[in-house]
Amino acid sequence: MSTLTIPPSLTSPRDDAILLYRAFKGFGCDSAAVINVLAHRDQTQRVLIQQEYKSMYSEDLSKRLASELSGKLEIAVLLWMHDPAGRDALIVKQALNPDILDLQGATEVICSRTPSQIQHFKQIYYSKFGVYLENDIENYTSGDHKMLLLAYVSTQRYEGPEIDREMAVNDAKHLYKAGEKKLGTDEKTFIHIFSQRSRSNLVAVASAYRDMYGSLKKAIKSETSGYFEHGLLTILRCAENPPKYFAKVLYKAMKGFGTNDTTLIRVIVTRTEIDMQYIKAEYLKKYKKPLNDAVHSETSGHYRTFLLSLLGPNN
């Protein structure tokens, strides 16, 4: 099922605000009309629509959406209305809620973002929630996992493509000595290298490790466990190929009996305006099935329509 889309160029934010207001009027909400507008507007357009709606109807659009929509559709649409940094801040804050602790989700978002993205969402985190991200990590995580996250969010890593090959070889040697070579694991060395090195340097470290000792990913899997392992692997996989990493996250969310809708919503909504076309290509390549088809078979109703609208047509 798909709704007829209105080309963004043919409507103004004011027109869109009117269309949304009409969708809310009367008995029940015209969810199809809401999706038809919002799923096909980019971040800038969504901001303008929210401003127009507020000035015309003296109410907050997100609050109105929250009262009109429900269930998984409501969660997905409300998340979509934020800008990327605000969205990341909200996801991590909700994941570090002691009542419904989702350390997997918090770790994924923190360890898959670039240093500048982390700095941006840390600022919003504090201004929105009145608490520093580091404080919540300190309170709701533990052990090596906590040390890794704290180091990762507080280090300004280089974001360019240049690599230091000599340093990469030394790092690979240090990781081998800290892990596979010794009885037990020196987690501090893993934390130091994985939190200090740029993505391009980390890829060089993994390459040097492979040349000398074999797979660094396999070493991480055999030497570490739990959320600490998840954090290290997320950092490494996102250094190598973020779309491939997220294709795997989506596959796991839909694999087997039942669907992890929290993960499905988080990844689709946060990656739609970043690298979704590449994620779809990686998904098809690895799992021999279009991502759209997988999402279609795991979801239903307006929730399905919204997610498929964000994904766009099968390529």
Image (cartoon, rainbow, N blue to C red):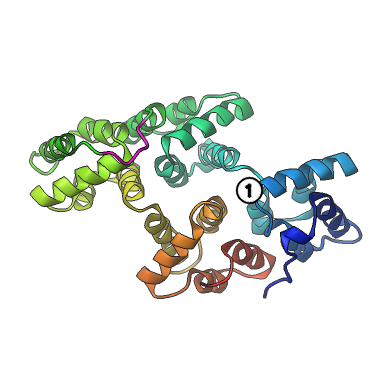
Position of residue 103 measured from the top left corner of the image (x, y, whole percent): 44, 42
Say which quarter of the image contains residue 93: top right
Quick check: is 159 in the magenta stretch? Answer: yes
- Closest to the observer, 27 or 16: 16
Report the amino acid beneath label 1: Leu
Residue 57 among those drawn in magenta: no
Q: Quadrant of the N terminus?
A: bottom right
Residue 213 visible in the displayed image: no
Relative to 306, does residue 173 appear above or below in the rendering?
above
Q: What is the magenta range?
A: 157-162
Residue at the spot x=76%, y=50% of the render? 65
Instruction: Name, please, the residue furthest toward the right.
Output: 26
User: What residue did someone put label 1 on?
Assistant: 79
Q: Which of the 4 quarters of the picture holds residue 162?
A: top left
Q: Residues within 10 Å of mark 1 (few under 14, many from 20)?
A: many
Using the image as rendered, state which of residue 146 and residue 157 is in the foreground.
157
Look at the picture and state if 256 lies above or below 149.
below
Q: Position of residue 289 (x, y in %)?
A: 44, 75
The chief SS type of the magenta part is loop
- Residue at 35% of width from left, 33% of height from top? 158
Query: SS of the residue at dot 1?
Result: helix
Which residue is at 54% across, 74% downward? 297
Q: Is residue 82 left or right of residue 291?
A: right
Q: Is residue 39 left or right of residue 163?
A: right
Q: Quadrant of residue 163?
A: top left
Left or right, 261 with respect to 239, comes to right
- Image coords of residue 268 (percent x, y): 54, 57
Which percent across, then down, holds residue 186?
17, 33
The residue under the point 18% across, 49% down is: 207
